[in-house]
Image (tube, grey):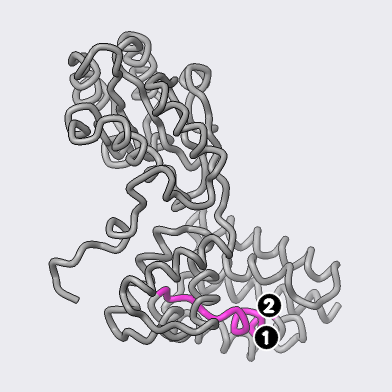
């Protein structure tokens, strides 16, 4: 694998709307827009890595072909959050004449929920002023962070989380294209650590392939700096059993061996608790303590102290 190799995220990005996986209803609507060459402003809402950017680029490619560079502007709003980018790049592109009569230009703002309120209000005015020549596609993980005046001027397309079968087909496509050897446990580990995010999945798989063409469960967890589910469950079970010292040793392994942050540990605990074979009352208490600990970490408390305090609280509750 040479240094000039493409990132697999780009290499395996679908180039046509028909190649996008897991978003059939949205893809059909976008195909209809391409066919009619007439479409509204849109908000692509949904979790990361499910195809929002891919759909926008594929739609533009099918609309404009070789002239895509002249009619499609892509900006990442999280890099340029302020009002200046709206008054500058966006406005300048919007005011230029379209390529041909009856064909509008597209401005795609990725991560638009990162725009400041002032920038969003400036964007609303730009959308109104150039409505006859330009369409806007706003991509956002949280559509609720887009101001109401913009939401009312857009059709909101909600992208769904990809399921395991859809992601497995994508993994098999990459494995075939790159001649990788993977067993079922490695695939399951990849699905677990990627959490429905195809971009994250692709990057982890490419990183693992750089070390060895034979992808194992261990290599996936090592690259992702994540613990196996059983190790998280083991820590929680020691705490539930009242053995704080053993639970603390498991926590030290997660932090020092796997290099996990406090938030990483809590997120995995949050994922595993519902699947544990324990009393429902204990599950409720665990979720409550995980939530309290997460709040303290977000507020800036020391993560080691808070995680150990959480384990101590679980041990105390189980003994009472």
Q: Is residue 117 above or below residue 209?
A: above
Residue at x 37%, y 32% (from the top left corner): 115
Among the 4 quarters of the image, the one containing residue 130: top left
Q: Are marks 2 and 1 in contact (CB under 8 Å)?
A: yes
Q: Is residue 118 above or below residue 31?
A: above
State left or right for residue 281 relative to residue 311. Answer: right
Asked if the stretch drawn in magenta spans residue 226, the answer is yes
Of residue 245 and residue 61, the one placed in the foreground of this image is 61
Percent from the top left, x then y, of residue 212? 31, 86
Secondary structure beneath dot 2 equals helix
Our reading of the magenta stretch's main secondary structure is helix
| Mark 1 surroundings within 10 Å by alpha-carbon count, few (fewer than 14), some (14 through 19), many (20 or more) | many
Of residue 130 and residue 104, the one placed in the foreground of this image is 104
Q: Which residue in the structure is indicated by mark 2?
A: 312
Q: Which residues are magenta?
A: 224-236
Q: Which residue in the structure is indicated by mark 1?
A: 244
Q: CA distance from mark 2 to mark 1?
A: 6 Å
């Amino acid at each position: 694998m040479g240094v000039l190799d493409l990132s697999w995220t780009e290499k395996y990005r679908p180039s046509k709307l028909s190649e996008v996986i897991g978003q059939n209803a949205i893809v059909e609507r976008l195909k209809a827009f391409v066919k009619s060459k007439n479409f509204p402003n849109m908000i692509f809402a949904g979790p990361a890595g499910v195809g929002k950017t891919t759909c926008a680029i594929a739609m533009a490619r099918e609309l404009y072909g070789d002239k895509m560079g002249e009619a499609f502007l892509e900006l990442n709003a999280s890099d340029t959050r302020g009002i200046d980018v709206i008054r500058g790049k966006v406005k300048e592109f919007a005011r230029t004449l379209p390529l041909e009569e009856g064909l509008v230009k597209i401005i795609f703002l990725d991560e638009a929920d990162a725009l400041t309120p002032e920038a969003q209000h400036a964007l609303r005015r730009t959308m109104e002023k150039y409505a006859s020549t330009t369409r806007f596609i706003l991509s956002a993980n949280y559509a609720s962070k887009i101001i109401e005046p913009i939401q009312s001027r857009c059709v909101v397309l909600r992208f769904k989380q990809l399921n395991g079968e859809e992601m497995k087909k994508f993994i098999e496509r990459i494995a075939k294209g790159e001649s990788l050897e993977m067993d079922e446990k490695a695939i399951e580990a990849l699905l677990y650590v990627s959490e429905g995010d195809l971009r994250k999945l692709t990057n982890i798989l490419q990183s693992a392939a750089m070390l060895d063409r034979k992808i194992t469960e261990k290599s996936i967890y090592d690259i992702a700096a994540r613990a196996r589910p059983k190790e998280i469950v083991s820590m929680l079970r020691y705490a539930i059993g009242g053995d704080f010292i053993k639970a603390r040793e498991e926590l030290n392994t997660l932090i020092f061996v796997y290099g996990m942050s406090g938030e990483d540990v809590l997120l995995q605990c949050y994922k595993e608790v519902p699947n544990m074979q324990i009393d429902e009352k204990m599950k409720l208490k665990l979720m409550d303590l995980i939530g309290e600990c997460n709040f303290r970490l977000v507020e800036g408390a020391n993560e080691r102290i808070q995680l150990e305090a959480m384990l101590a609280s679980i041990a105390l509750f189980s003994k009472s």
